Amino acid sequence: MGPLAQPHPPAGNPTDRPTTARLELTGISVAFGGVTALSDVSLTVEPGQVHGLIGPNGAGKTTLFNVACGLVRPTAGTITWQDKALRRLRPDRLAGLGIARTLQGVGLFAGLTVLENVMIGAHRHARAGFLSAVLALPRSDRDEKALRERATESLAALGADGYASRYPGSLPYPVQKRVALARALVAQPELLLLDEPASGLSEEEMHELGDLIRTLSGRMSVLLVEHHMDLVMSVCDRITVLDSGKVIASGTSTEIQADPAVTAAYLGDEVDVEHDAAELGHVPAGATGGAQHG
Ligand SMILES: Nc1ncnc2c1ncn2[C@@H]1O[C@H](COP(=O)(O)OP(=O)(O)OP(=O)(O)O)[C@@H](O)[C@H]1O
Ligand SMILES: [Mg+2]
């Protein structure tokens, strides 16, 4: 598999203008039955910035991410997107709002080819509705051709166009992750939500992903949930740290690295010291970054 193609701009904001899209999550609380997953959490992704969301396992990162993409409805709090308060975000309306996401894990459709998977991500710009996109029944040949072209371009931007006719299950995990990212980017989102995009990637692939995220910033705002501290610290403009469903720190990477509360949150759990050390970037010899969570 080739490296991520860097100079070729990935499918993004079509005019290359800086995005003005701001996502504000204010006072968000989420309870699952008796479990409080989030308690009064606020976070703002500023336009064109990469905002990191970190914290130990079970801190509530994916839950907040799912609130931001409409998969979890908060029990309290407000979501403001492009200066409009949304009563409720719906996952099937995200693309129309200019929001794209990749989920923890991969989430590609096993029965569709790589190209078809990415074409589904482009339905915001196709006249075909979501269902017909899913069923690969575009309204006209012209729509289909345009969709194919855009999907191919997006795959090429991630160095994955060579896999267009393959099925996701037959591909190595890092390639699947690129395809999932190509699917998110083909919609030319104003906001990109990434949940653990680096899991399962090699060190080199992680660097390439970091470079890619930096090239996307400006044109789109990015919310990045990630365990790999090196990546988070190198690409994020701002970072929010969650622990036990609460924000324990927020600031630049320099501020976060110097914050004793953050170190304590990561190193406090003696039961799983090796895992926590890996999260902080001190990967013990022989350890891999490929652990899957959730
Ligand atoms: N659907 C659910 N039902 C019940 N409890 C849940 C559900 N989803 C998450 N939780 C609980 O909410 C808390 C936060 O979980 P979440 O998955 O958001 O953490 P995380 O920070 O993403 O963890 P990880 O680093 O392992 O991905 C945990 O206590 C988890 O067990
Ligand atoms: Mg998670």
Image (spheres, helix red, strand yellow):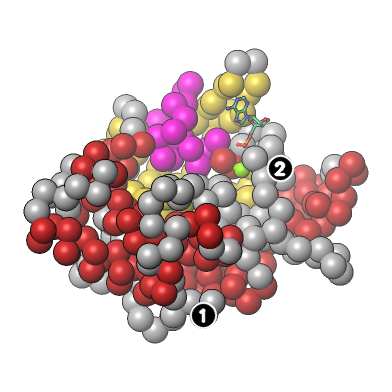
Q: In which quarter of the image is residue 117?
A: bottom left
User: In screen coordinates, is 165 left or right of 18?
Assistant: right
Identified by mark 2, the residue type is: Asn
Quick one: which residue is furthest to the bottom in this view?
7
Magenta segment: 63-78
Residue ID at (67%, 49%): 292
Q: Is residue 257 visible?
A: no
Q: Is mark 2 within 8 Å of ligand 1?
A: yes
N-term-proximal mark, 1 vs 2: 1
Q: Image check: 25 left or right of 267?
A: left
Q: Provide residue 212's location: percent of width, then percent of height.
A: 47, 72
Find residue 28 and report its horizontal and vertical position in percent. Answer: 49, 31
In the image, residue 114 above or below residue 127: below
- Please name the amino acid that badge 1 sits on: Gly
Q: Is mark 1 within 8 Å of ligand 2?
A: no
The residue depicted at 40 percent of the width and 60 percent of the height is 114
Query: What is the number of the mark on residue 127?
Result: none
Task: For mark 1, give the secondary structure.
Answer: loop
Q: Where does residue 194 sit, x and y in percent of width and height?
A: 49, 53
Q: Quadrant of ligand 1?
A: top right
Asked which quadrant contains residue 258, the reply is: bottom right
Asked whether the beta carbons under mark 1 and mark 2 sit within 8 Å of each other, the answer is no
Q: Distance between the residues labelled 1 and 2?
A: 32 Å
Above or below for 193 versus 228: above
| Residue at the disc numbered 2 | 57
Q: How many marks can you see?
A: 2
| Residue where numbered disc 1 is placed | 2
Residue, x 86% and y 46% (percent of image)?
272
Look at 34% across and 61% down and name the residue there.
115
- Name the foreground residue: 133 vs 254: 133
Compare residues 191 and 242 and report the one nearer the observer. 191
